Amino acid sequence: MNFRHVWVVFKKELKDIFRDKRTWIASVLIPVMVFPLMFLFMDMGRSKLERNLQEDISVVIALGEATELADHIRSASGLKVINEVEPIAALQAGKIKAIIEIEENFQEKLHQQIPGEVKIIFDEVSSESSMSVSIVERVIYDFSEMVRLERLKDLDINPDRLQPTAITIQAFVPEGKESTGGMELMLISFLLPFLLMMYPVIGGMPAAIDLGAGEKERMSLEPLLSTSADRLSILAGKYLTILLASIIGVVTSLIGIFAAATISPDMLPIGVRISPISMIILIGTSLSIAMILSGIMLSISVFAKSYKEAGTYLSPITILLMAPAYLTMFMDVRTLSDVMFFVPLLNSILLMKEVLVDIINPLHIITTFGISLVLVVLALLLTKYMFNKESVIFRS
């Protein structure tokens, strides 16, 4: 392999793919734009829902209107009791958010100190109706608590005597360290590994298809092979080009994440602190994934007869890569088995989850990078085999 030839091929392929608008769209524009737009629209929907819930929620008291509870509901802030001849129809039409049915003899049971039944009917199709249930329930609970305190007062009992415990919930943070982020960490520990797994494919796929099957269709592969550059140099130049496109896809997607967090901080808080060693491991893991996938994509593209066929073969890769990301969504990083780190790609996701919570396990790191190194070598050998096989190169 001649490194000068590799550099020449690399520059040539780099110019070619970045002249192609599809590469710019797939590797740069989509990753940068998709997350800001997605979270912007989500934030707009959430804001609208919150505004609607901040207004008085329209409810109907279908039964038991002449009760103390009904009077309490009418006077409660946040609720607006209206009259509807057909409450179910009004609920389905979105005019009201809930129907409250109070047991017929509720007032009599209240005086006899017997629990009375209250039913809250909501529309499970409507998100506003579903979220209104907790507000209506809180108003009814406030009434129950008020009655309970009055009864204790009549019995001359201090309510504090019936509250034997006072619970305080506090997350454990090792001495000298800061909190790793709570719910924010849960979000980013799923989202970041998912992106670092998916975007090497999304960013590198257009380049891989163009440098293999695309050259076959344009009939520009044969002239390239007839130059003084040996096949290994040509292969290395193409591989490095795809690897660069994959890395650009990852970087631009992360830029999109930070842009989305700036535009919609309530929807995507990213105030998670990542240590320098964890950042190095994350970058190394992402790079190893990109190296593996770049070799696989180039092999498939060289094997394919046409641009369309290469796209058909490569598209399922994105679906296959989703499996380890979703499989690890609810895994506890404290109780991971060492055996799981011998599973290719799954180990990379798990390692990224570990380092994001500042768990540095040398065995897991060595195992993951060792397996990834083997896969990189195998991917390159597969690519070399495909590129040296005449029946594959001239397959049409």
Image: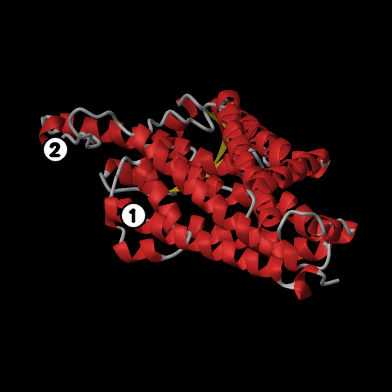
In whole angstroms, how far apart are the C-alphas of marks 2 and 1? 47 Å
Q: Quadrant of the C terminus?
A: bottom right
Q: Position of residue 357 (x, y in %)?
A: 34, 41
Q: Quadrant of the N terminus?
A: bottom right
Q: Which residue is mark 2?
A: 165
Q: Nearer the viewer, mark 2 or mark 1?
A: 1
Q: Is residue 6 left or right of residue 277?
A: right
Q: Position of residue 162 (x, y in %)?
A: 13, 37
In the displayed image of the protein, which residue is found farthest to the front?
A: 228
Circle 2: element type:
loop
Q: Residue at x 68, y 49 (%)?
A: 237
**How is this picture coloured?**
secondary structure
Quadrant hosting residue 294: bottom right
Quadrant hosting residue 174: top left
What is the three-letter code of the residue carrying label 2? Thr
Q: Position of residue 264 (x, y in %)?
A: 58, 27
In the displayed image of the protein, which residue is found farthest to the right?
A: 218
Disc 2 or 1, which lies upstream in sequence?
Answer: 2
What is the three-letter code of the residue carrying label 1? Ile
Circle 1: element type:
helix
Q: Residue at x 51, y 46 (%)?
A: 287
Q: Tell which of 117 and 218 is nearer to you.
A: 218
Q: Tell which of 270 and 341 is nearer to you.
A: 341
Q: Residue at x 13, y 31 (%)?
A: 160
Q: Position of residue 183 (x, y in %)?
A: 40, 38
Q: Is residue 105 visible?
A: no
Q: Residue at x 40, y 47 (%)?
A: 353
Q: Which residue is mark 1?
A: 366
